[in-house]
Every structure is written in C-alpha cells, then in structure tokens.
Amino acid sequence: MKTNNYSAGILQYIPFFYVIWSDDLLSYSEISVVKNAIEQDDTVTKEDYKYLTQCLDKKNPPSNNELKHWKNTIDNSNVKLVENDTYPLSTFSQKMICHHFAACPFNTHLKEIEINLGIQPNHYNHLFEIEIDKEITSNFYDSNEIDTILKGAQTKVIDEFRKDLKNPIFNWQTRRTKEAFRTHVLKQIAFLAEKGYGAMAFPEVYGGTENMPGYAAIFENMMFVDGSMAVKFGVQFGLFGGSIQKLGTKKHHDLYLSATGKANLLGSFAMTETGHGSNVRGIKTTATYDEKTDSIVIHTPGKNDNKEYIGNALDSTMASVFAQLIVKGKNQGVHAILVPIRDKNHQLMAGVTIEDNGYKLGLNGVDNGKIWFHQVRVPRENLLNKYGDITPEGNYHSAIENPSKRFFTMLGTLVGGRICVARAGLGGAKKALAIAVKHALKRRQFNDSIKIQEDLLMDYPSHQLRLTPAVASCFVYDVTLTHIMKTYSDPNLVDKRKIETQVAGLKSIITWFANDTIQECREACGGKGYLLENQIADLKGDVDIFTTFEGDNHVLLQLAAKGVLSDFKSEFNSAGFTAVLKLLGARISDKLNTINPAYTNNVDKDHLYNPKFHKHAFNFRTRRLTYTVAMRIRDYVKKGIPAYQAFLKVQTHLLALGKAYSIELAYTIFDDFTATISDDKNKALFKKLGVLYALHHLRKDATWYLEQGYINGTKSKAIRQRVERLSTELRPHIGVLVDGFGIPEHCLEAPIAN
Amino acid sequence: MKTNNYSAGILQYIPFFYVIWSDDLLSYSEISVVKNAIEQDDTVTKEDYKYLTQCLDKKNPPSNNELKHWKNTIDNSNVKLVENDTYPLSTFSQKMICHHFAACPFNTHLKEIEINLGIQPNHYNHLFEIEIDKEITSNFYDSNEIDTILKGAQTKVIDEFRKDLKNPIFNWQTRRTKEAFRTHVLKQIAFLAEKGYGAMAFPEVYGGTENMPGYAAIFENMMFVDGSMAVKFGVQFGLFGGSIQKLGTKKHHDLYLSATGKANLLGSFAMTETGHGSNVRGIKTTATYDEKTDSIVIHTPGKNDNKEYIGNALDSTMASVFAQLIVKGKNQGVHAILVPIRDKNHQLMAGVTIEDNGYKLGLNGVDNGKIWFHQVRVPRENLLNKYGDITPEGNYHSAIENPSKRFFTMLGTLVGGRICVARAGLGGAKKALAIAVKHALKRRQFNDSIKIQEDLLMDYPSHQLRLTPAVASCFVYDVTLTHIMKTYSDPNLVDKRKIETQVAGLKSIITWFANDTIQECREACGGKGYLLENQIADLKGDVDIFTTFEGDNHVLLQLAAKGVLSDFKSEFNSAGFTAVLKLLGARISDKLNTINPAYTNNVDKDHLYNPKFHKHAFNFRTRRLTYTVAMRIRDYVKKGIPAYQAFLKVQTHLLALGKAYSIELAYTIFDDFTATISDDKNKALFKKLGVLYALHHLRKDATWYLEQGYINGTKSKAIRQRVERLSTELRPHIGVLVDGFGIPEHCLEAPIAN
C-alpha cells in the first residue's frame, strides 16, 4: 500500500485506475490498452511502472482499501471536474498533478486510454465526490412558478388531483388484451367518481361544484396517466352526463345525475352511425312517438344505420340515443332520448344488439361498440326535452322554431367536449415532449473526433428546432384553452355561436399539433421512443383519433371558416349557404390595409419580435383569405354554379382560412395573457415563447406571405433564422420549461426520462 | 347576347365553353388548343368562327349573363350525361345537336379539346343540372398493365410470390401477445425459407439465385401481409445472412450460408448498442484477440454498452457481433465476428445474457432483445474476415489500410438493407393508399340539400388533394428504388460511395413519405381507419420505426448532404470534414445559371407541365444549397471555428440539401424511365404522375423558390392550382392506379376496402 505521497507518475493514473476498477468490468483488451500506454509513457519511472502494472493484474486486483485510498486522494484533490472539457478525465488528472508538482504538462498517453476505452464523464462523474461543472440545464427560471402560471385559477383543483394520481391504481402497466385493460380502466373510473371528480361539472345538488374549467383541467392531467382512462371518463361524465345535464330537464337531473356522477349509472352517448360519421343531421335512427302507448319507439332502419364506435357500449346500462324524432308523422329533426340498454343483470334489453368494435390503434381500454335498436320502446319522458318536447297531448313543441337553429343549439351545448379533446391532445403532447426533452438532456451521440465526450442530443441545432417550437406552442395552447373554457363556461354568454366557431378551429389545429408533436418526439427518441415502456408509443396510438372524434378536423375547419365568413351573425350552420352569401354582399369591398412597404422588408429584431407585427400578419392573413374566398364563391355563383358546388370548389381555400383564423385567435389570446403576468422575469419568458410561436407559424406559411408580397425573400429568411436562434436561446431553459408542465414525477416512469 | 337558336356549329361548343370559363384556369396554351380545334373544324361556319373566337378572349371574357345563358341551354337540353362514355363531353355535345339538327356526326375536334385539356366529368358534372349517369371509376387504363410496368424485370418472381401469399399462413389476424405473434411469424419465416425465398440473394451453390433486385421486390410485397414478417425476414436473411455473405469469406459461406437460407440456422445482427444507436463507430463492445489461445474474446465493457434492439435475439443461435477489434493492444476498429449465443437445446451460452426488449409501438411479431457478452471466447476463424483478418501469427492484416475507409467499405456492403427498408415503407404506403382510396370510392358523406345521394369522399377536392399526390409519389418512388437496386446490384460497380449517398437520401425521404401517407390515410378513413381490422393501424405502428432503423433519417440526410458536398470523390464518410473543405475550395465559385426572368413568371400549362422546367428547378435547388452551405462552412472555418462545430452550425441547411438532392434524384430517374415505356397511353399516364409529383414538391418548397426569386407569387399560385387540378384530373383513374400497385386481393381483407 502506497502512502498519500504518490509520485507524479503514479498520481496521474489514479483517477483512471479508480474508474477502471470501480466498475469491475475490465477485460483483457482494456488492460492491454492501459499497459501499452504506461509502457510508452516517459513520465513514468521504473518504480512507478512496477506499481502501476501490479495494479493491473486481474488475478490479483487492488484491494478495497486501496480503492478507497485512491478515491480519497481524488476527493481531496480540490480539483473540479469540467464535463465539457475535450478530454475531461485526462485534464482532471493533469490538474491534480499541478496541485502537487511544478511541472504538469498534458499527458497524451492518458488521452489514449481515455479514447480507446471510451471513458466518459457519465461513466464516472457519480464515482467522485468532487465539484462537477455539469451545465445540462439552467436553473434561472423556476418550474414551479411556470406551472403555477399555467394552472391559474384551477391551481387547487389540479394540485389535489395530481396528488390523487399517486394512488397505485394509476401506475403505468402494459395491458395487451382489451378485456384486462378495460376492467382496469373501469376500476380507475370508479375510483375517480368516488373522489368526486366525475360530478365536478354538475351542480352542487348532484354532487358537483359546477366547475367546468376544473373538469377540463383534470381531464388534461388524466392524459399523463392513460388515454383510455381519460376518454372513458369523458364518455361517462362529459358526454353521457353532459347530455343529461344540458339537454335534459329537472326530472332527468333528479333521476340520473347523481348516480351518473358516482358512476353507479354507466351510460353511453350514441350519436355517430356507421353510415354517418361527421354528418350528424343525416343520421338514420328513428325515434317515433306512438300516441296510443304514449311512448317513443327507437329503431335502426338499415344495416349501416347502427350506432358506431360508441364508448362505454359494453359496460353501460343506459344510452343517450340521438335519433330523428318523428311526431304525428312529421320529422322534427335530431333529438336525444334516454334508452335503457341493459337490465340489472347486465343482460341486453329486448330489441337491443351490441357488438364489440374490437381492437383499435389505441385506446384499447375503452369499450367501443356498435348498437342496433329493433323497435325499442321507452316512455315519452325519456326524451331529453330541454329544446324540444312532446306534450301530453302528443304534439311536438319547441321554443326554437327554426329546426336548423334548434339542431345547432342542441349540439352547441356539447361544445365543451371539443375543448376537452383539445386539452387532452395538449396533455399528450406535453408528456411526449417532457420525455423527449429529458431524454435529449441525457443521451449523447457522436462527437468531434478530438473529443472524448459525445454531444447531448439537446445540443444539436436540428434537435432544438424539432422540439423547442413545439414546447412554446404548448404554452400558447394551454393559455388559449384555459381562456376559451372560461368564456364557454360563463353563464352570461347566451349566444354560443362565436365560441363554437372558435372551438371548431382550435380543436382542429391543436389535435393536429399534438399528433405531429408526439410523432416528432417518437423519432427524436429513436428506437427507445418505439418501446412501450417509454410511454410515447401509447400516446401516439391514443391521441391519433383525436383528429377524428368529436368532429373530424377537416369538417370542423370548414365549419370554422364558414363561421368567419358569416361573421358569426348569420345562420352559417344551417347549410344555408345563401345566407352567407347575402351577408358577404355587404362587405365584399376589400377593406384590407394596403401593405406598408416598410413592413415588407423590415428584418430588424425589434420588429420581428414585436407582437404588433405578428398580430398584423396573422390578421392580414385571416382577412385576406376571407375576402378572397368570398370573392371566389360570389364569382362562381354569378356564373350560375349552385352555392353548394361553389363551396366545394373552394374547399381547400376554406381549410386554409379555418387554420389561419385559429392561429390568429390562439396567438392573440396568449399575447393578451402575457400582459397579465405580474413578475417581469416570467413575463419576459412567456413573451419569448409567444414570439417563437408566432415566427414559427409565419415561417410555416411563408409561401403564402411571399405570394401576397406581405414579406419579401430577405424577411422570410430572417424569420427562419430567428426561429432557429430562439430555439437555441431557449436551450438552457428547456428542461425547466417541460418541468413547468407540472407532470407529476410518478406519471413520468419512462426509463429514458429518468 | 345570342338567342337560344345557336347554330349547330356553335351549339356543340357551348358545353365546352361553359366548362372552360366557369373554372377560370385557362392559360394561353390551352386557349390555343381550343382555337386550333375550331380552325380545323369544318362544321364551323365563318360566322360561327367569329363568335367562338370572340368567346376565347382572355382580356374580354364572356359576361356572367352569357355564361348563365349557356348553362340554361345545357340544362334545358334534356340530354343525359354518361360519365363512362369514352369522350363524355364530346358525346354529350353530339347528343345536344342531334336533338336539334338532323346531321350530328361525332366531332373529332371536340375530342381533341377534351383530351388535350384533360377535361373530365368530375370537372363539370356538378355544373350542369341534368341527368347524369355516374361512374365511380373509369376503365380507360388497365391496372394489370400498370402493375406490369412497375414489376418490370421481376415480374415472374413477384407473380409467383404473390401466388404463394395465398397460403392461409399469411391470413391477417390480430395477435396481441408478443409470444403468440412471434411464434406465428417464425412459422411464416420457415415457410418462406422452405419455398426458397430466404436464399434468393445468395449464390446458386448456397440455394439462391443471386437475385438481389428480386429479393427487394418480394420484401416490399411482404408488407402487404405483415410488417413483423417482413422485418424478421430481413433480419434473418438480409442482415444476418448478408453479413456472412458480404463480410465473410468462403469458409463462412460453406459453413453457414445454406443453413441460413433455409432458416435452419437462425441468426441476429448485433450492431446497435444502448449507448450508441446511430454512431456505429463509437460502439463499445470489444473483441480482443488472445494469442495464447488463438481466440477472440467478446466483451461488453459498461452497463450501457450492451447490444440493443437486436431482432431475432430470442430465436437465434448465432449472432454477427460488431465490436472494436483489438489485436496486440491496438484497436483496429469495428469488425463483425460470428458468435454462437445458444446451444442445441436453445440454452444461452456461458457469458451471454439476453433480455427481451418487450412491447413496442409496432412489429411485436419481431423478437427484439438486448445482449450482453461477458468474456465470451470464439475461435479466430469466426472473424468475418473479408476486409480485415488476423493472421495465424496473430497479426492484424487488411487490404484497406485506411481504417476509416475500411469501416465504411464494410458498412457499405450493407446498403442493400437500406434500399429494402425504403421498399418496405413504400409497400406500407401503397397498401394504406389502396385501402383509403377504395374506402373513399364507397363512402358517402354530406350532400347538396337538393340531392338524395350523398357525395363520395373521393369526389371532395380536399380528399383528392390528400390522396392523389401520394399515389403519384408511390409510382415515382417505386421506379426510383427499382433503378437504384439494379445499379447497386451491378457487380461491375466497384466504387459504391455514390450509391451510398443516394440510398441514404432516398431511404430518408421515402420512409418519411410512407409515415406521412399512412397517417393521412388513417385520418382520411376517419374512425374506421382506427380499427385494427381495417389494417391501416398496424401499418402505422410497423412503418413508424423505419425512419429510425437502418440509419436515423436525420443522420442519413446529413450523410447524403456531405456526399453531395464532396461530389462523391473525397472521403466525406471519414468524418474528415477538412477533406470536404479542401475539395470545396476548387469549386467554390458560383457556377449557377443566372435565373431566366421568362422562367420566373411563366405560368403557361406547357411550361408548368414540362419536365425540363421541373428538372431545372430541382437541380437549381440542389446546386444553390450546395453552394451556399459550402460558403457558410468556409466562412466559419476562416474565423477559426473547428470544422466539426461549423458543420453543426449548418445542420438544418445540410438537412435541406439532403432532401433537395434526393427529390431531384427520384424525379430524374422517374422521368428517364417514362421515356422507356413503349405504349403511348401508359406513357402519358406515367408522365402525368411525374408532373404531379414534381409540382407537388415545388409547391411544398415554394417558400424557398420565392425567397430565391426563382418563381414569383403568380407562378407559385399557378403551381398550387395545377396540383389541385391534376389531382382532380386523375380522380376517374385513382381506383385503377391503386389497383396497379398489384396488391393481391387476399391481402386486402380490410372490411372498408371491400
């Protein structure tokens, strides 16, 4: 055993020997590499050599005491390990010698060992009790503060909910067979109902707090656990419960709402039909009032007219069935009727046929099924009669005379569900980003040939560009959806048509964003992202369908565009295209600002980062697209082309308008919000995130802006460069930003995220 | 204004004129087509001619009233439009005249207009309020002929293989547990081996036909059955078998090749490590030659240095292990060694540890696992020694002295696998498109309120735009990959570096294309696309990882870009960035053609459809990006920034270059190919598909072209309109086009496709 007083020749090898032996994984080839180096090292004396080679004898390894001694020598060296040194361990050794000896040149033989054995800081930085210069992520911002800003008014609800998610029932586990998966999800739903979450949006008298914004917030948080759980929850409490609450009246509430909130009454929401996915007005199921028996007969006329994809179909005992209500031989349009579908023994009611939809790309914990009704009779009282009723005399009556308006008023009450779908998509994107970013802050790949340590994925510009604008977008959409839900839930808001337009657009762009982001995260994690255990794969499968359900995005965007076209005033929903056109006549003149040339080529940072520029650019696009699409429709109609066909011809134009409108809306809401943040530090951060969002989107649609002459080529390039630069500027904070999403640690069990 | 009493000469042109003007897409070349026809039309009097030409004045177009009058004339004609007439509009015109005039022969001049302008029923059937005999799909083209063109030299092999796929072993079935799934896939592999497909690429003496192009073709066709089967097949025969064939020598071939081809010897390809996914040169597993025992010791040094994601890991008895070969204390770089990993009883060999990778997003029929080696000893002869050997005296020897060149020569032999991955991705995209298109030709959603029948999804312009450019791209990429594989397999091709660059780029853009397309198909099928039974979901999960394995796309694109930069001549592969820079010095002067202003704003159809324009535009982009990225790198280096860091700084620029190069390459190969098609009808069809591909891609990158001033805003819009119009023009043929993929009926069991 040597004393503390190692010679310089030996001392320089101590860190290497300690690293090599502490892992006990030394193979002969590695030993021979080290031996070779020592042999050729002139700084090693004969006596040093004897000691050093003796320490490389696999059959007679250094004792534990010796190892401890080496470690003490290192720990007491007072030398700092700098991870981003080119040869961190060799440099560390050099510095150690410099402490004790006058001459301490860099030893290339040590470097050879470091290279040939591939020794990296992440191999040994945990072995030494010394100061380490790590610099993986900055702590300038505080993730808790960021999280609190996002949680806003729902902080208390969310914090409690996240605590509840610690229950082992929410632990992640692979469940491959749908039966086992569904059984577990049903248990989770019962647990959540028991805790009061199911009834959250219901009035207090039925066990709730009438807190729809809180409901939406916890709905997003459920995605941190599992998509199937969130969707099943949404079907039971949001769709089924919501239909009773919003389309029914007190008699229905009293009978069913408490039991629904407690999940004692399980229900499904039977709207979509095989033959009619997006076109709800065209559904074929009939609900015929039979005067003789004072009852309503539910019937599926044709083989493709069955209810399709109905969540909770296998577990539920009741369904809110949407059907064409026929009273005295007259079709009064689509109405919802409560239909018992199973008895107390969970046997199907007479006339009801249910079939499992089988396995899906995702959400296999949700029991989707098809439902057929054969002359199923329910009492007249089962009609959810808030907007249309059958009197005891057997006459139809509704306060809303226009059938089209009535239809959209009924559907409008369910718009909250669309906000929740967008929120859930956002939750999925956040979780995927958190995993991908945490992985990129650990994982190293490739390096400069002269460096021993490989670079962190997160330090690659292309990786920053892949993930950072998506992180910024999450902040923008979070704030947007919170705001929209607040507006939607305001009991003073009577005319909900404007918010319907807004939600149609936002749901589309946010669910697409979520899908794209999760895909990017999967690829950014390479093969690791493909393993189920790393939790991105499930998100991919689950979130995928969000672009389709609660309204297909392509259909919704056209709805949004038509809403914009009619300036929220006409009955655009009624398929009354002529009404839209009438309105357009009044404002067909181009009121657009002429483009200011100073804008077109201004590439100054102050200008490019100024929200005034972003808002002007977004608003210009919305108005310009509105105007041009209106002109095109008018021209077609003038030539005698029917309005429906004219709208078909401009379909891609309408989709562009719907997107443009939604992006402008999100950005405007976010920018208004940043102004309300009280502390300057976080306000500046949020402002920067907003700038990145805006420039990222201007960049994505630069073709259009260039075509319009709104920007010139130089400005377009400048915007691209700013997007890259902002992504790099945010690099030190990206870890804190994704922590700011507030995803509970126990929901981030992915091995690559730890 | 003319009266109702049009002359026969004029009347016959009215339907054409109404169609032409209602869309307003008329370019000068199209007007001249119509003018020519009228001039040569003997049935047109002088007076008629005056009126007709007057109606073709773009500067003084017919008034809206005139258009309405035309429309009334058509609507009141009582003539029925028969969509599947060979020339429906000409025939319609003929019938209109027959109503009023005794003589009404078929007018070939009208036919010329109809053909040359590509006027199709779906352009105008909604414009007329007349009875329409609708057709879902046209039989103008023959899907068998199209299929035969694509199959080319491999027709016989592919036809036989497709027949073999009729065996019930290939029937589609949901297999949720990996164990059951893997067992079945293994049976399929054995079946295919038995039929001789496993050995197809091997020399005849080992049971094959040395037909690598045939191997690639059947590999793509396997995707019509199941992704897991294809990948397992690729691992066993392509990777494991390929490594023996290409890195080994006769002794290895004699010992193992026949058994491998028959699947009697199951093997894995152990290259990737947990710590090193894309960076193969940085792998840590060591293979140390031990002179005393004349054996090689395989060892996993650190806990993250295990082999990762190794296909066939649970079934195989041998592995091609890639490791740092250390001979006499010197690291000679990465080499492959055959290592027995299991004995005859399928028990792990001493020192070998294998762990199941568990469930994945897709490909759960493939047994991926992790492998650790603890001092596993194999005979010296197990070194696959074609490019580097250990002599009986224990010295390392290689004919390729430069270690970097040696490394890339070894990897280069495996480039065929990348072509196969791209082919498999393409196969997945084709199948998804076939399902989505067949669904869209059946499924109806929404309608004009006056119509009974809802519209087919495929008749929506947005749906055409979503699917048609993707169908066209499949044709381009099919032809491209066939060509590339032919070149790669040419035994006369010695220097494979150029083709490596090409394959790196093509694999990236084609696998991304496949993912995007499958996603679009899923969404285009709505909720139905989400059900496993409809087979798109599995494709999504399976193809997803193709962007990552056999080279991460981001890494490959940079490899391609570096290849372009060094003009295929330098050692760009060697991470020798300085070599690249040296070469650049010689050609740093801008040799780009100056942009011809006549090009910039030419929106004429003849120009926009001309492959000369497309090639010029693609080539301009590749050269311009090469030049600008080279200049940027040079400027960084001049400032003293290390070359590695300089390359990092231009990373996104390199990615753009890699993509641009690959798209140009694919289009050029396809355009050359169309010239070789012997019959004019199919040649014209393929040419049109090429035009759509080209314009679609120019449209996608219009921002860049606008920034460069290569096109102006008007041209950019014209390109967009042409993409939409071409998608509509191909609408009648889209069913035949996807049938032309030749997917066997028994592989298209998806209910929505039937």
Image (cartoon, coloured by chain):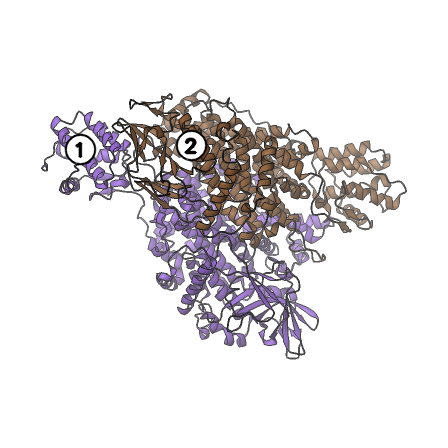
Chain colours: A purple, B brown
- Compared to residue B711, the image places residue A218 above or below, namely below
Q: Which residue is drawn at 70% across and 58% down?
A: B449
Q: Mark 1 points at which residue?
A: A12
Residue A20 can be seen in this image: yes
Tell me what residue is drawn at x 56 percent, y 55 percent.
B527
User: Residue A305 location in percent, x, y?
Assistant: 63, 61
Frontmost residue, B79 versus B474: B474
Q: Residue B26 carries which label?
A: none
Q: Distance between the residues labelled 1 and 2?
A: 49 Å
Element class at badge 1:
loop
Whether marks 1 and 2 lie on the same chain: no
The mark lying in front, picked from 1 and 2, is 2
Q: Position of residue B478 (x, y in %)?
A: 57, 35
Image mark 2: chain: B
Query: Which mark identifies residue B256?
Result: 2
- Give coordinates of residue A478: x percent, y percent: 44, 55
Q: Residue furthest right?
A: B102
Disc 2 residue type (three-letter)? Tyr
Query: Which kind of residue does numbered mark 1 sit on?
Result: Gln
Q: How crowded is mark 1: few (under 14 residues within 10 Å), some or many (20 or more)?
A: many
In depth, the one of A272 and B679 nearer the eye is B679
Which element type, helix, strand or loop, lies under badge 2?
Answer: helix
